[in-house]
Amino acid sequence: MSDQSSADAPSLTIPIPRGPVPKAPARKVRPPVEVTVDGTSVTVPDGSTLLDACRQRGVDTPTLCYLETLEPVNVCRVCVVELEGSRTLVPACSRKAEPGMSIRTDSERVRLSRRMVLEFLASSTDVSTAPELQDYMERYGADSERYGDDGRPAASQAQPPKIDNDLYIRDYSKCILCYKCVEACGVDAQNTFAIAVAGRGFDAKIATEFDVPLPDSACVYCGNCIGVCPTGALMFKSEHDLRESGEWDESKQQTTDTICPYCGVGCTLTLHTQDNQIVKTSSPMDQEVTSGNLCIKGRFGWQFVGASKGSKAFADGESTED
Amino acid sequence: MENRFFIEHATSGFDAYCDAVSDFTLEYAERETGVPREAIRDLAHSYAKASTAQLCWTLGITEHHNAVDNVRALINLALLTGHVGRYGSGLCPLRGQNNVQGGGDMGALPDRLTGFQHLENDELRAKFEAAWNCKIPPRRGWHLSGMFDAMERGDLTTLYVLGENPVSSEADKNRALRLMEGLDFLVVQDLFLTQTAEIADLVLPAQAGWAESEGTVTSSERKVQRVRRAVQPPPGARDDMRIIFDLAKRLGHDWGEADARTLWDELRTLSPMHAGMSYERLEKLDGIRWPCYDESHPGELFLHGRLWARPRVGPRAPFAAIEHRPPVDALDEEFPIRLTTGRRLDSYNTGVQTGLYSSPLRWGETLDLSPEDGERHGLDEFEEVIVSSRRGSVVAPVRFDPGLRPGLAFMTTHFPDQVDTNKLTIDAVDPKSGTAEFKATAIRIDKMGSP
């Protein structure tokens, strides 16, 4: 012990020799599972869902409440498929693939069910800022006007957006109750639990504790709920304001991936820019560092870039002693 | 509980370490820290017995006059338990900016060239001299607090500050301001007219490195990642690199066109640990962890695996026999409360950047106290009080935080225009790292209007 011979002692000035390249331990691999999708055999890793099998087969399956980074909650039912031997349609996003399962993804029963789900959603909520949902409606020939009211959101849902802070707005007339924001605020990402589903049946809605305004709630403004919202019910205030003034124009927008400046974690920030201004941020979900999650500074702290009005920026170049 | 195999196989100095810590019983630790002995023991047992465990820390460990000793104490624990050099185990300083790690990696340290190559190693220095066709002074320079001491002595008379706001961020602000105002010439290169820029002789407007410039940053996990330009900078603001290139040109050195990728490729020829990180690979692999020695090298998931290799590769990892030394700014009857400084979630350092977005979580500066201390001083919440240390006084409203224990207070440096917290802090410096003791100031609290 304590054999501190001089050859053994590390020197500050001499580089330490290279060791072996470190490796992560191998994971236990269980045998893969074989299922049949629309008559074709597909082999997926153990633990995969029917949705994974569909995707591997190249079948584009609609999803609204499902996200790779969240636990499936099975509420929207737009991903249902027909499982041989099952009385009811099953949600592909959460049903685990078992050996020998055979599913149909585009049968008349599946198409009808998906169409009706979409029609119900679009007849009760404002889907104007939900491009994916609109695409699905077109694909399945969904016509929300069949349920009256010219396709306008149901009166019970119509309400003005809640604007109680300068960072993001909540427009619950656009909410399809997919629970994603609740999941992202809770155990699936942020563990803040500022929001949950309040009320039952037609009165069910997403709310803070006792429905208080956000600044009085437990919200920490990570904006991870905005990142997962499929309908634009949760929206950057910057985007909301530009939409209100008619200036929001996605055809003029670019996205650039960079790294958040605020700490050493290294979250990828996707900056959405329009007319040389950052208009909002997001983060790619397939990024290994934080799986798309950010904090208040990363999500909203970019406003100093290009700041000049009322700030100490010398953007006009007047104090430039160049 | 200790990992005998690892201690024998890969470490040195274990016996001296045992001697040094033999007095630190649980009773002693409880008395010194106020943390119950059972809690310390439970945590120690959980750490030692875990199959994998990491120690992560931030400035609460390093902003002390014995910063390096604090880190060495953590390293001792990792060596003792073998929680280093294995997948899932290790030591990780969580960096406070996106490129603190990268700054050091690039050689922004007093004694290192790029890639941690030691400046005082003749062979390594000669490699850089050959590449750059110039002579590099063979002796280490000053770190930040060493620079302030040099200003005090009159040895440092001209200062070029890039993207830092030391007038607001240095401990013992009155001294920092006095010394910086006494410089012959001060240049500040920054995005905004900070308190430091306001006293500069020359201000060079810069671009936001992460949104208006191209380049790379290195995260806490040693991962080199690309930053990219998303918006054009405001008129007059220029890329940091271009400013330095232009300055070199004025001084008679034409370095050619300032281009992030060209510079990075030059760095790869000089820094072996970055050699395999081409822009293409950084793009394709979404960042690479150093060391990455060539273009077939994957980068290293964790460090120090060599300590477990049989036979062991390279030198043993030494235990450090360190002593416990309490903070320099001692508590006494006149200054009975311990003030520690730090950040709040929505704000950042001296607030230059975060001050420009509207945060519902922000309430400005407060002196956070335990409700018990508030009651002892007869204070109402949000009442303004005079906070004094042995160096200065500030006025700040009081906020009660049940998360603080009696005797401990908390403030930030986010709002220097409202409250100059650093007028209170002490610039007692760790001689090994040059870090000031921001985390341990002795203060007193007086009601407004009291003598």
Image (cartoon, rainbow, N blue to C red):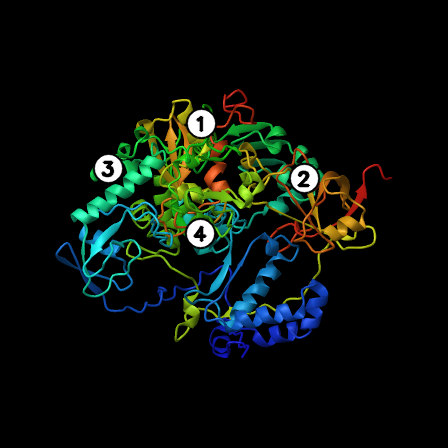
**Relative height, residue B204 to residue B285 (above, below):** above
Query: Dots 2 and 3: beta carbons under 8 Å?
Result: no
Residue B214 in percent (x, y) is at 38, 37
Query: Dots 4 and 1: beta carbons under 8 Å?
Result: no
Q: How many marks?
A: 4
- SS class, disc 1: helix
Residue at 66% from the left image edge and 70% from the top image edge: B37
In this image, B91 relative to B300: left or right?
A: right
- Mark 3 and mark 1: span between their CA atoms? 30 Å
Judge the density around disc 3: few (<14), some (14-19), many (≥20) Cα neighbours within 10 Å: many
Residue A129 in percent (x, y) is at 35, 33
Q: Amino acid at mark 4?
A: Ala
Chain of residue at mark 1: A
Picture quadrant of residue A210: top right
Residue B24 at least partly seen: no
Q: Which of B373/A199 is in front? A: A199
Q: Nearer the viewer, mark 4 or mark 3?
A: 3
Judge the density around disc 4: few (<14), some (14-19), many (≥20) Cα neighbours within 10 Å: many
Q: Earlier in the sequence, mark 4 or mark 1?
A: 4
In this image, A78 relative to A201: left or right?
A: left
Label 1: which residue?
Answer: A241
- Mark 4 and mark 3: span between their CA atoms? 33 Å
- SS class, disc 4: loop
Kindly give the residue lying farthest to the right in the view shown: B451
Q: Amino acid at mark 2?
A: Ala
Label 3: which residue?
Answer: A142
Q: Which numbered marker is on residue A189?
A: 4
Kindly give the residue lying farthest to the front in the view shown: A148
Label 2: which residue?
Answer: B176
Picture quadrant of residue A38: bottom left
Q: Quadrant of the N terminus of chain A?
A: bottom right
Chain of residue at mark 3: A
